[in-house]
Amino acid sequence: MSIAPARLGARLAPYVAILVALMIVAAAPVSAADTEVHRVVGIAKAQRGDPWSFGAEGPASFDCSGFVYYSFRRADLLERIGGARRTAQGCWDWFAHRGRASRSHGRRGDLVIWGGGRHMGIYLGNGRAISALTSGVTIHRLDGLTSSFTTFLHVRLERG
């Protein structure tokens, strides 16, 4: 039983079209912003379980601002958070002065401030953040700390 080449081609055409579409999607470049977000979040998540230590900025232990500083410095994106290490309050002031602090519209990779400027971390999306607590670097809910959520600091790693 043989199938004529024209009939075989007609039968395979839908499959070839799907394959070509998948290849185009797979070859599409990832935007620089997606890459930046993935770098920062990936570095931050790799520190889970590392211990807390006052004033530490890694790589073996962290306090909250040292953890944020380390994550952005390792991602080569320190300029996005002002180019220097700052306390949680200092970061809040820096971002607020530039009109980039708000209680809504948090995006993955933004900074999060709790307790009116006493604690900070990195927003992961879906109401979760990662920060260096006294129990170590942990992923938790925004409302999961004893200090109340204060604001998002918009780092502008938005997707293109």
Image (cartoon, rainbow, N blue to C red):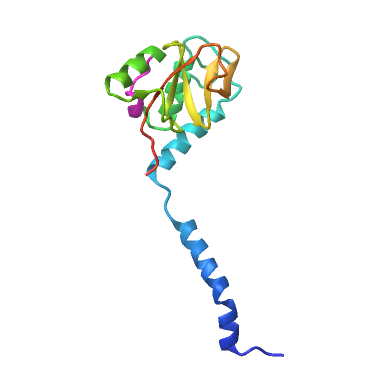
Residue 76 picture quarter: top left
**Extreme residue toward the right, this view:** 1
Quick check: is 97 in the magenta stretch? no
Quick check: is 84 in the magenta stretch? yes
- Coordinates of residue 58 in the picture (x, y in percent): 50, 20
Residue 152 picture quarter: top left
Instruction: From this view, report whether residue 5 is shown above or below residue 59.
Output: below
Looking at the rendered image, the quarter that the N terminus falls into is bottom right
Count how many numbered circles sit on residues in the image.
Answer: 0
Q: Main secondary structure of the magenta part?
A: loop
At a point 51% along the width and 31% down the height, the residue shown is: 124
Could you say which is closer to the camera, residue 133 or residue 127? 127
Looking at the rendered image, the quarter that the C terminus falls into is top left
**Extreme residue toward the left, this view:** 98
Instruction: From this view, report whether residue 150 is shown above or below residue 47.
Output: above
Instruction: Provide the residue span drawn in magenta.
Output: 79-86
Residue 52 picture quarter: top right
